[in-house]
């Protein structure tokens, strides 16, 4: 199983300077903004509300004004004519630095929000993230809203029944939002699940080796990340598994898959209510025939330390040098995962957007674009993809004030030059991002990114 590639890194308070648009004739009221004459993509359904003025005050959307309605006199006016305003995106499988390199931590948080990622479900956390979560919510730190998963659970911290149950209680008492399932043994997975259900702590992530998809769904795992154990479910019932190992996300069994079982796994998924966070890019980046040295030259790689990029290059070479790596099987896995995603979506399964950043050439924030484009290549429409990162993320957290552009909702917003419903690529290079009512115009984003890149030259 993979491990998080980032060490836990500390955060210090960030300077919160106020990037502005045009100022009204009166002195601007702090926290008051108007996106003037913008096309709104509300994400309540597939539609565009043309030529609205969106009023934001104190971190909330106050009103969507029709043409001719009077604008607030003391708000900062953001010229947005011809542009598109949509909700911020969620990264539902991200990793957030912790407590031993403050500058690096600030940079990683900004990489998320620079691309319009305004919420991160941090997967595989650290107790320090509890404090980070609260300080972000209070506006003391600059970055996306954070939901925190516990440290990775495995045999090292859940190696017996007593240890597994104690770990769950500790995570619950510490205030984690989720227990991250890693690689415990099947019996200790059962103990973790039982104790988590007793104390009311959701658990999700991987499904450990030796645990079936059916069992994980039956005991209430709230999310399955990376489509874990779906390939194993699809193996033909009469297949001979003698001497066969599952390999990387089931790639070792890909030739035994019976596609006629796909409707059954869709029905099982829908019935259970589990969320899937597919992270297509995690597998596709490793399985692709693009040389890792070429991937290391992608523009966004300049925003991470060279040692991280070098580690990814080595990891891809090591993976593709394994005896059990077969290029044809890897490509078949990619195709099957896309087919599964489309079937799950069409069948009404719960899907939430996530790319697993930072992992294997997934730079925080920027990886959203790779993931979104792969989801479209799998057969989802741009709107379908955007739903998984906006409205569906809000549903996952039972939030009734997020994931849409509506009065009373959180002012987590992306301003785009072109309509994202027409092409998912229009998500790239936002004209500005608003996080909890704090406005980041394009020029400030560009300047901050240049500073980050400069630290890694």
Image (tube, rainbow, N blue to C red):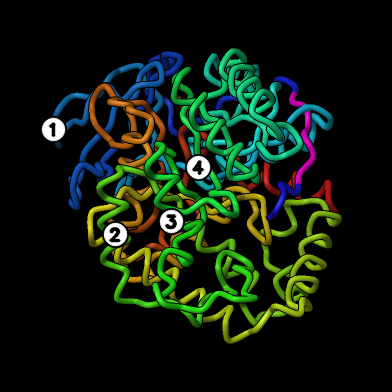
Q: In front: 162, or 390?
A: 162
Residue picked out by circle 3: 427
Label 4 CA crowd tier, 10 Å (few <14, some 14–19, many 20+): many
Which quarter of the figure is the N terminus placed in? bottom right
- Residue contact at pointers 3 and 1, CB within 8 angstroms: no
Q: In front: 170, or 371?
A: 170
- How far is the residue under mark 4 from the one under mark 1? 32 Å
Picture coordinates of residue 90 (x, y %)?
Answer: 45, 41
> Is 408 drawn above or below residue 182 in the view shown?
above
Label 2 CA crowd tier, 10 Å (few <14, some 14–19, many 20+): many
Compare marks 2 and 3 and give the one earlier in the sequence: 2
The residue positioned farthest toward the bottom in the image shown: 328
Residue picked out by circle 1: 68
Name the residue: 29% across, 76% down: 260
Compare marks 4 and 2 and give the one earlier in the sequence: 4
Start and end of the magenta stretch? 6-11
Q: Tag 2, which secondary structure?
A: helix
Say which of marks 2 and 1 sits in front: 2
Compare marks 3 and 1 and give the one earlier in the sequence: 1
Label 1 CA crowd tier, 10 Å (few <14, some 14–19, many 20+): few
- How far is the residue under mark 2 from the one under mark 1? 49 Å
Q: Tag 3, which secondary structure?
A: helix
Say which of marks 4 and 3 sits in front: 4
- How far is the residue under mark 4 from the one under mark 2? 29 Å
Name the residue: 26% across, 50% down: 270
Whether residue 97 appears in this view of the structure is yes
- Residue contact at pointers 4 and 3, CB within 8 angstroms: no
Q: Tag 1, which secondary structure?
A: loop
Residue picked out by circle 4: 117
> Residue 266's mark?
2
Q: Is residue 305 left or right of residue 74?
A: right
């Amino acid at each position: 199983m993979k491990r998080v590639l980032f060490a836990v890194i500390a955060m210090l308070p960030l300077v919160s300077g106020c990037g502005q648009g045009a100022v009204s004739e009166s002195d601007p009221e702090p926290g008051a903004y108007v996106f003037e004459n913008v096309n709104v993509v509300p994400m309540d359904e597939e539609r565009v509300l043309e030529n609205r003025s969106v009023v934001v005050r104190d971190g909330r959307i106050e009103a969507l004004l029709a043409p001719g309605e009077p604008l607030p006199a003391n708000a900062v006016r953001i010229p947005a004519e011809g542009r598109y305003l949509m909700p911020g995106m969620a990264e539902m499988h991200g990793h957030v630095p912790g407590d031993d390199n403050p500058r690096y931590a600030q940079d990683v948080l900004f990489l998320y929000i620079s691309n319009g990622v305004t919420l991160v479900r941090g997967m595989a956390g650290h107790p320090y993230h509890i404090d980070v979560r609260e300080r972000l919510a209070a506006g003391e730190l600059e970055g996306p809203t954070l939901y925190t998963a516990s440290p990775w659970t495995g045999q090292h911290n859940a190696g017996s029944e007593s240890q597994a149950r104690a770990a769950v209680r500790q995570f619950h008492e510490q205030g984690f939002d989720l227990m991250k399932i890693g690689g415990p043994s099947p019996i200790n997975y059962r103990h973790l699940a039982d104790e988590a259900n007793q104390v009311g702590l959701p658990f999700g992530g991987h499904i450990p080796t030796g645990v079936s998809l059916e069992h994980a769904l039956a005991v209430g795992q709230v999310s399955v990340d990376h489509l874990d154990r779906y390939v194993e479910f699809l193996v033909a019932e009469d297949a001979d598994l003698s001497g066969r190992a599952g390999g990387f996300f089931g790639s070792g069994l890909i030739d035994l898959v019976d596609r006629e079982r796909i409707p059954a796994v869709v029905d099982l998924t829908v019935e259970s209510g589990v969320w899937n966070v597919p992270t297509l890019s995690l597998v596709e980046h490793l399985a692709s025939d693009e040389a890792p040295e070429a991937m290391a030259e992608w523009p966004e790689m300049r925003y991470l330390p060279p040692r991280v990029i070098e580690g990814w290059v080595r990891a891809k070479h090591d993976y593709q040098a394994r005896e059990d790596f077969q290029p044809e099987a890897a490509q078949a896995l990619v195709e099957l995962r896309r087919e599964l995603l489309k079937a799950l979506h069409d069948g009404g399964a719960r899907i939430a957007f996530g790319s697993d950043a930072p992992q294997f050439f997934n730079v925080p924030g920027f990886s959203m674009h790779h993931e979104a484009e792969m989801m479209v290549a799998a057969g989802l429409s741009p709107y379908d993809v955007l739903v998984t990162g906006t409205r569906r993320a809000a549903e996952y957290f039972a939030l009734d004030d997020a994931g849409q552009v509506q009065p009373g909702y959180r002012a987590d917003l992306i301003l785009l030059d072109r309509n994202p419903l027409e092409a998912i690529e229009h998500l790239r290079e936002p004209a500005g991002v608003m996080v909890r009512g704090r406005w980041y115009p394009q020029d400030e984003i560009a300047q901050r990114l240049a500073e980050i890149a400069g630290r890694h030259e």
